[in-house]
Image: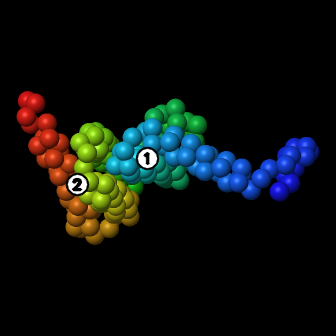
Amino acid sequence: MDKTVWGSHIKTSPNRLRLHHITHTYTQSAEVKMLGSDVLLCFIFYSTLLILKMYIIAIITGQVRLRKKAFANPEDAERHGGVQFCRIDSYVERCRRAHHNDMENIFPFLFLGAIYSMTGPSYAVARLHFLVFFLGRVVHSIAYLLALKAPTRSFAYVIAQVPCVSMAIQILMDVASFA
């Protein structure tokens, strides 16, 4: 099989290409495995999605501030029309509360999930913990931002807390003998 690379003529056998592909695939897999177990990689995936969700809520808050012309600081209000826009808006405050609530709940999850991942749990069970927490937080944020009727937000909060409590209990059971 003939291959042209950067204008030069190179002869490559199909077996050599297959070996390169297998080696390249193995190298990529080995690099990912350096991060840790499948459970830890799953945790990293869902944690990254949660952090991105927090960034999105922060961006939404900023956009709502601009749209509503409701700035927290006089210098920002001056830049966008005058000090009269240094004011409180109920929807901006709702967005801020949603972001603050994320911080109150996602940061503990990041700690619990990281430690839980190191205790050697079943991949399927760990993935379920991470997925349920992630989905609960997404529904909670949507319910908060769209002011959905009660008890939607409360239900999402409770559902997201179940895996956190479960992970905390399992961590304590694993380390209790060392206390």
The scheme the figure's colours follow is rainbow
Say which label, 2 or 1, has the lower sequence index.
1
Q: Residue at x 25, y 45 (%)?
A: 120
Label 1 belongs to which residue? 48
Residue 113: % across, % down:
29, 45
Outermost residue, top side: 179
Q: Residue at x 16, y 47 (%)?
A: 170
Inter-mark Cα distance, 2 to 1: 17 Å
Residue 98: % across, % down:
34, 51
> Vertically, is 115 above or below 158?
above
Residue 61: % across, % down:
45, 49
Q: Quadrant of residue 115?
A: top left
Residue 8: % across, % down:
91, 43
Q: Identity of the amino acid at label 1? A: Thr
Label 2 belongs to which residue? 163
Residue nearest the observer in this picture, 51 or 25: 25
Q: Residues within 10 Å of mark 1 (few under 14, many from 20)?
A: few
Residue nearest the observer in this picture, 108 or 130: 130
The number of numbered discs placed on residues in the rendered structure image is 2
Q: Residue at x 19, y 56 (%)?
A: 162
* Horizontal arrangement in the rendering, residue 34 relative to residue 19 (left or right): left
